[in-house]
C-alpha cells in the first residue's frame, strides 16, 4: 500500500520533477529521506515531482547531492532540448560588462566560436581556446578554414547560458587572427596556454587573435530569491 507521500497520480509534472522522481525511484529512496538529505520540506518535494516548478540554484544543488547526481543531469544536460525556448524571466536584468569583466569571463578558457568570412559566407567555428597576454589562442589544422583566416579580421564569441533561469552572459571580441610560427613562442604557449583541441586529427597550427575591441553583456538575477524552496538548514 502506498503512502500519501508516495502516490503516483501526478498532475503534469515538469521535466525537472520527472527526472528527480525517476532518480529517486532508481535509488529506492522515499520522498521523506530525500527531503531530509536536501533540507527540503517533504511537501515541497512532492509538489516538485508532480507539478512544473521553478526552483533556485541552491535547491537544485542540494537536491542533486541528495539524489547522488548532478545539476546538469537533473536539468537534462541539454539532451534533445533546443536552446532559447525558455520564457522571459522578470527576475533578471540585462547589464553591460566592462572590458575587465569581459576578460574575467574569458580568462578561464574553454569553448568559443571564431566567426569569419569564408568563400560561401560567414561561418562560426567552435574551438577550444586559452587566453594569454590578453590574446586568444587556439590550434587548428594547417589546411583548414581557420588557418586560412590568418591576417584577416575575425570575431570571437563565448557565452554561458542557463536555460532554466533565463540567465547567463556573452562576450564578443573583434580582432585580427594570425599564425604563431616562432618556435620559441610555440614552446611557451604549449607550456602555459595549450587549449588541447577536442577534435581529432593533426591540429598543430597555432592561431592567435589580437583584440581590437571587446564587449559583453550579462543577465543576472534581480530581486529576491524564488519563493517556495522549502526549509533550509
Image (cartoon, rainbow, N blue to C red):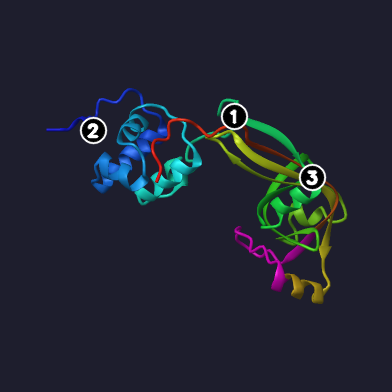
Badge 1 vs badge 3, beta-carbon distance below 8 Å: no
Please provide the residue range marked out in magenta: 190-208
Q: Is residue 46 left or right of residue 200?
A: left
**Residue 202: x and y, percent?**
66, 65
Kindly state the secondary structure of the residue where label 1 is placed. Answer: loop
Q: Which mark is residue 91?
A: 1
Q: Which mark is residue 13?
A: none
Q: Main secondary structure of the magenta part?
A: loop
Kindly state the secondary structure of the residue where label 3 is placed. Answer: loop
Disc 2 and disc 1: Cα gap in Å? 32 Å
Of the two numbered discs 2 and 3 on the same chain, state the one appearing first in sequence. 2
**Residue 127: x and y, percent?**
67, 54
Of the two numbered discs 2 and 1 on the same chain, state the one appearing first in sequence. 2
Of the pair 157 and 154, the residue shown nearer to us? 157
Is 146 colored magenta in this rendering? no
Kindly state the secondary structure of the residue where label 2 is placed. Answer: helix
Q: Quadrant of the N terminus?
A: top left
Q: Which residue is mark 3?
A: 98
Q: Residue furthest left?
A: 1
Of the two numbered discs 1 and 3 on the same chain, state the one appearing first in sequence. 1
Disc 2 and disc 3: Cα gap in Å? 50 Å
Look at 60% across and 60% down and name the residue there: 200
Q: Which residue is mark 2?
A: 5
Amino acid at each position: 500500500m502506498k503512502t500519501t507521500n508516495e502516490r503516483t497520480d501526478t498532475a503534469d509534472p515538469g521535466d525537472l520533477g520527472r527526472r528527480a522522481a525517476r532518480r529517486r525511484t532508481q535509488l529506492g529512496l522515499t520522498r521523506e529521506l530525500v527531503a531530509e538529505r536536501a533540507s527540503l520540506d517533504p511537501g515541497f518535494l512532492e509538489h516538485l515531482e508532480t507539478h512544473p516548478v521553478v526552483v533556485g540554484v541552491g535547491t537544485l544543488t542540494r537536491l542533486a547531492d541528495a539524489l547522488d547526481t548532478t545539476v546538469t543531469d537533473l536539468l537534462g544536460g541539454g539532451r534533445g532540448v533546443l536552446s532559447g525556448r525558455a520564457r522571459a524571466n522578470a527576475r533578471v536584468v540585462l547589464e553591460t560588462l566592462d572590458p575587465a569583466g569581459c576578460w574575467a569571463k574569458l580568462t578561464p578558457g574553454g569553448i568559443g566560436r571564431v566567426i569569419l568570412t569564408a568563400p560561401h559566407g560567414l561561418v562560426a567555428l567552435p574551438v577550444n581556446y586559452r587566453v594569454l597576454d590578453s590574446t586568444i589562442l587556439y590550434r587548428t589544422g594547417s589546411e583548414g578554414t581557420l588557418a586560412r583566416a590568418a591576417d584577416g579580421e575575425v570575431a570571437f564569441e563565448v557565452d554561458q547560458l542557463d536555460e532554466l533561469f533565463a540567465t547567463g552572459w556573452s562576450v564578443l571580441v573583434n580582432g585580427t587572427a594570425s599564425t604563431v610560427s616562432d618556435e620559441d613562442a610555440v614552446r611557451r604557449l604549449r607550456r602555459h596556454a595549450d587549449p588541447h583541441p577536442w577534435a581529432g586529427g593533426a591540429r598543430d597550427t597555432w592561431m592567435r587573435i589580437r583584440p581590437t575591441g571587446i564587449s559583453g553583456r550579462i543577465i543576472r538575477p534581480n530581486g529576491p530569491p524564488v519563493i517556495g524552496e522549502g526549509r533550509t538548514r
